[in-house]
Image (spheres, rainbow, N blue to C red):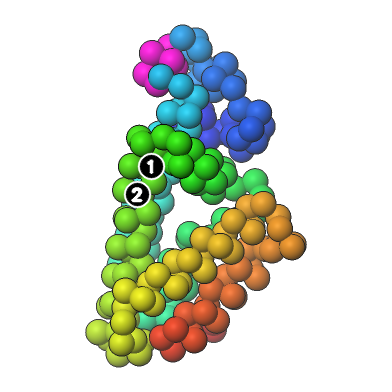
């Protein structure tokens, strides 16, 4: 998976080949294909790998931050892509595209999305319980903020309209402040 991510970061997703991944991993393309039936499955397992690592990092960091705006801000910082070359988010774009035609990819996307929604829900719910946020409908707030995050992340990854990490983060924080009084822009 490290080899796949390294190649994607260097070459881009569209031009990544199984042979490139195999070369980087020090194995034959046949060996890679023994474990994965297709390039799409290699890419989806790379996405799962990225997400697993990200969730470990997020859980560790968020545990040390009090519920409220700063915890939400840190979650957003860890989730937002760095820029157009972000390999994890490039994999997300590919997964969303493939999901409409592949039941296995659709199931993986649903699983990984549910994990992020659960994490975001927990951050907002604990913020409400700590009286750091005001929110009557946590589920609706999560839906709005999650849609905002994903929409802006796509713009950052694609470079649309010059969207940057900083601008996307600021827009998410403004949306959170509107949704449930979540400041966090200190």
- Among all residues in the image, which is located at the extreme right? 162
Residue 133 locus on image (x, y percent)? 36, 87
Main SS of the magenta part reads helix
Residue 110: assigned label:
2
Residue name at image x 41 percent, y 34 percent: 102
- Among all residues in the image, which is located at the extreme left? 129
- Among all residues in the image, which is located at the extreme front? 101
Mark 1 residue crowding within 10 angstroms, few (<14) / some (14–19) / many (20+)? some
Q: Quadrant of the C terminus?
A: bottom right
Residue 176 locus on image (x, y percent)? 47, 80
Tag 1's secondary structure? Answer: helix
Residue name at image x 46 percent, y 9 percent: 30
Alpha carbon of mark 2 to alpha carbon of mark 1: how far? Answer: 6 Å
Tag 2's secondary structure? Answer: helix
Residue 168, picture quadrant: bottom right
Residue name at image x 59 percent, y 75 percent: 171
What stretch of residues is rendered in magenta? 31-36
Task: Answer above or below: position of 184 versus 48.
Answer: below
Side of 104 where 158 appears, left or right: right
Judge whether residue 21 is colored magenta: no
Residue 153, picture quadrant: bottom right
Contact? badges 2 and 1 (CB < 8 Å): yes
Side of 60 where 84 appears, left or right: right
Q: Which residue is more in the foreground, 142 or 79?
A: 142
Q: Quadrant of the N terminus?
A: top left
Task: Answer above or below: position of 133 versus 121.
Answer: below
Q: Which residue is more in the foreground, 57 or 177?
A: 177
Residue name at image x 38 percent, y 42 percent: 106
Side of 168 where 138 appears, left or right: left
Residue 71 locus on image (x, y percent)? 39, 74
Q: Which residue is mark 1?
A: 106
Task: Answer above or below: position of 118 versus 69.
Answer: above
């Amino acid at each position: 998976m490290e080899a796949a991510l390294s190649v994607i970061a260097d070459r881009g997703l569209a031009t990544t080949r199984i042979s490139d991944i195999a070369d980087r991993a020090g194995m034959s393309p046949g060996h890679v294909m023994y474990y994965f039936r297709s390039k799409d499955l290699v890419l989806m397992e790379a996405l799962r790998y990225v997400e697993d690592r990200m969730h470990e990092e997020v859980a560790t960091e968020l545990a040390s931050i009090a519920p409220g705006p700063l915890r939400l801000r840190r979650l957003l910082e860890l989730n937002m892509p760095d820029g157009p070359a972000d390999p994890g988010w490039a994999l997300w774009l590919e997964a969303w595209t493939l999901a409409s035609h592949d039941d296995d990819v659709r199931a993986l996307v649903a699983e990984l999305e549910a994990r992020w929604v659960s994490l975001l829900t927990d951050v907002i719910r604990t913020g409400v319980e700590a009286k750091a946020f005001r929110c009557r409908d946590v589920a609706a707030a999560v839906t709005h903020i999650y849609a905002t995050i994903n929409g802006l992340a796509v713009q950052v990854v694609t470079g649309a309209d010059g969207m940057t990490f900083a601008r996307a983060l600021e827009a998410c924080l403004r949306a959170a402040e509107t949704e449930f009084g979540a400041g966090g822009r200190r």
